[in-house]
Image: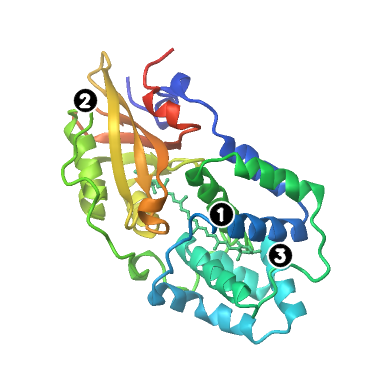
Amino acid sequence: MALTIQSAQTIFSNTQVPSPIPATIALFDQLNVDDKLAYLWYAYTEMGKTITPAAPGAARLQLAEGLLSQIKQMSSEEQTKVMRDLASRADTPISRSYGFFSVNTKLAFWYELGELMKQGIITPIPVGYQMSPGVRFVLEATQKLDPGQQITVLRNTVVDMGFDTSDLGPSSYPKAATEPAFQRTTPVISSVKIDGITEPAVLGYIEAMNADNFDAAIALFTTDGALQPPFQKPIVGREAIAKYMREEAQGLNMMPQQGICEVQPDGSKQLKITGIVQTPWFGVTVGMNISWRFLINPEGKIFFVAIDMLASPQELMNLRRV
Ligand code: EQ3
């Protein structure tokens, strides 16, 4: 029987535990625009007591520089309006430009605004703002998350800001190939060993990803293969996966720990692997508990891989079907 992405998405689904991340984002989405900005400020400064993101490289800030320098010259009311427009996804020139940024440039843009807020150059919260019970509720929900889940909530809220440019065609901003790279650190693991796993495509995938060797990783996929990032739809085809990896997978450190492999009657293999991934934004200070669910075709190529955020560290051990 031919492999389909739809059926691949369901592999090991009965071993999965719902993550609290979408529920927290849904609570955030219900806040009004000033509450959203206030929530992000309080969540970010609270988190900053224990973990802080690494300063983005000058090259990446340069991509956001045009918008940042416009904002710096504005009055405090105008600055607040820009932030409200971004958070409400309004159709304004700045919100459109932001919408074309890559994920990492969006994060770099807010990182810099956050620095300016800390220095008192930009007002973090609209003047006269009073914290609402709604914000308190979402902050409490956020505090219950582990650091890896907290940074995922922050990341996703930042990514969703700005005007939705997906239907507008390509932008004039530099994209994937010209995006400045994250400084790659030496992978924490020097050779890939995963308890219970010997599948060459999987070991090769982790090794290539830990070296930012996306060409080698892509070569392990079938031409119609797919990669499904956490909470997203599958990205289908080698070219689309390569573009995504260049934009979003640079500098990641992947530390798979254990896995299981089930051979199917048609010779394909289903594998679930759990482990830790670190983002260059937070380095070794934040480990995210994740799983990879691979479907390998009978010829040993990756037809599908889903990356899921785990609900708790206990889930790292949760490999068996129940
Ligand atoms: C200034 C402030 C605070 C106030 C204002 O009101 C509003 C905002 C937005 C503010 C600023 C907020 C800032 C600066 C937030 C910064 C957040 C950051 C830097 C978050 C970074 C998060 C990174 C994450 C969660 C990365 C996760 C990566 C994963 C899980 C990678 C998985 C992958 C694997 C394992 C694969 O095998 C394939 C590729 C893939 C990427 C899917």
| Residue 90: assigned label | 3
Q: Position of residue 101 (x, y in %)?
A: 51, 66
Query: Do the numbered discs 1 and 2 sit on residues whose CB atoms are within 8 Å?
Result: no
Q: Left or right: where does residue 198 sit relative to residue 222?
A: left
- Ligand 1 within 8 Å of disc 1? The answer is no
Note whether residue 19 is visible. Answer: yes
Mark 2: secondary structure: loop
Mark 3: secondary structure: loop
Q: Position of residue 55 (x, y in %)?
A: 43, 69
Q: Amino acid at mark 2?
A: Pro
| C-alpha separation, residue under disc 3 versus residue under disc 2 | 48 Å
Q: Position of residue 241 (x, y in %)?
A: 35, 49
Residue at the disc numbered 2:
298
| Number of dots carrying numbers | 3
Q: Amino acid at mark 3?
A: Ala
Q: Earlier in the sequence, mark 1 or mark 2?
A: 1
Query: Do the numbered discs 1 and 3 sit on residues whose CB atoms are within 8 Å?
Result: no
Q: Closer to the observer: label 1 or label 2? A: 1
Residue at point 60%, 72% (across, down): 118
192 or 13, which is in the foreground? Answer: 192
Instruction: Name the image quarter holding residue 275.
Output: top left
Q: Left or right: where does residue 69 sit relative to residue 248?
A: right
Q: Position of residue 138 (x, y in %)?
A: 70, 45
Note whether residue 88 is visible. Answer: no
Q: Amino acid at mark 1?
A: Met
| C-alpha separation, residue under disc 1 versus residue under disc 2 | 46 Å
Residue at the disc numbered 1:
47
